[in-house]
Image (cartoon, rainbow, N blue to C red):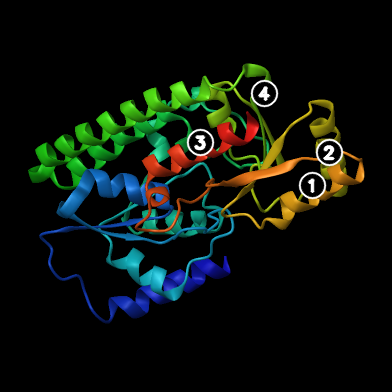
Amino acid sequence: MKQTLLFLLAISIISCGDKKQDKDILKVVTTTTMITDLVENIGGDLIEINGLMGSGIDPHLYKASQGDFRKLDLADAIFYNGLHLEGKLVEIFEKMNEQNKTTIAISDGLDKKTLIGSEYFASNYDPHIWFDLEYWNQVTHYVTDQLSALNPENKAAFEANRDTFLEKLNALKTELSVKVDELPKEKRILVTAHDAFNYFGRTFDFEVVGLQGLSTATEAGVKDVQRITQFIIDNNIKAVFIESSVPRRTVESLQAAVKDQNHEVNIGGELYSDALGSAGTEEGTYIGMYQHNVNTIINALK
């Protein structure tokens, strides 16, 4: 509620100041880095894009700043994940809808009946949809349709950019399938800091175990550590993984608990879960992020 009031106050202040200039170009705001990458691939230089969240930012806990309020006010459209991934921003987006601001949840492009259920989210769905390559294909089509509706004169260009990106996605799926096949199915057990990889697990036939729940707002307790420690020992798991948007101490405490039981488990590397890598790097793109994650997982678990 407090953040919503701040948003409304910020909008009233901004509205008395500068108004939008250059109405010929579509101004778009995105939330997570994955969505920023996707919309940028489709929109290209036909849109002006502002991403709220950068590398290493946890969307579950994100709070909008005064600068964010200005970006949101000046935007022609806002693209966000939905399914309560951006928990702290949901109320703001709802208020913006009431004020006729175009807010688009990319998850609306998916059939909800196919999503993985979750008792931890108000939507009752796991929101980490970007780890399902088929979903990202569908979302690419959905975002293209939304941009085309907002800017019909550039529909053909958006569709051409979409097709180029889909070619990359299809090539990525083939490449990763070959890489995953290097790992025997009995070794396909992924233990991470929080439960962000269930769609990845469903796509590539991995059993996935997160120390924290689906949201990083859910703290891991002593019983969680004890349970997963025993799971690691029972299944002779070689490595566990830290995440770029979750403090590494979460997994380091698990590693220490395993060691206390006279067993060893390696930290297999850092995975990108709720955010891409740094801008300007391979991992700063959706394609590069997914390649990095799969290579890191397979190499550590072999």
Residue type at tag 2: Thr
Give the distance between the C-alpha atoms of the residues marked 1 and 3, in whole angstroms. 23 Å
Q: In this view, does 247 lie to the left or right of 256?
A: left
Q: Which of marks 4 and 1 is nearer the N terminus?
A: 4
Using the rendered image of the protein, determine whether residue 102 is visible from the camera's viewpoint: yes
Q: Earlier in the sequence, mark 2 or mark 3?
A: 2
Identity of the residue furthest to the left in this view: 153
Q: Could you give the CA–CA distance between mark 3 and mark 4, rounded to whole angstroms?
A: 15 Å
At x 42%, y 55%, the residue is: 31
Residue at the disc numbered 4: 187
Sooner in the amino-acid sequence: mark 2 or mark 4: 4
Q: Where is residue 141 in the image (x, y as percent from the top left)?
A: 28, 32
The residues bearing labels 2 and 4 have C-alpha atoms spaced at a distance of 17 Å
Q: Position of residue 8 (x, y in %)?
A: 43, 70
Q: Which mark is residue 254?
A: 1
Marks 1 and 2 sit apart, C-alpha to C-alpha, by 7 Å
In the rendered structure, which disc, 1 or 2, sits on the residue that comes first in sequence?
2
Task: Assess whether mark 3 and mark 2 are in contact (beta carbons under 8 angstroms).
Answer: no
- Viewer-nearest residue: 223 or 250: 250
Task: Give the residue type at disc 4.
Answer: Lys
Q: In which quarter of the image is the C terminus?
A: top right
Residue in view at x 49 percent, y 73 percent: 6
If you read the primary sequence from the N terminus, does the residue marked by circle 3 or circle 4 appear first?
Answer: 4
Residue, disc 3: 295
- The kind of secondary structure element at disc 1 is helix
Gap in angstroms between the C-alphas marked 2 and 3: 24 Å
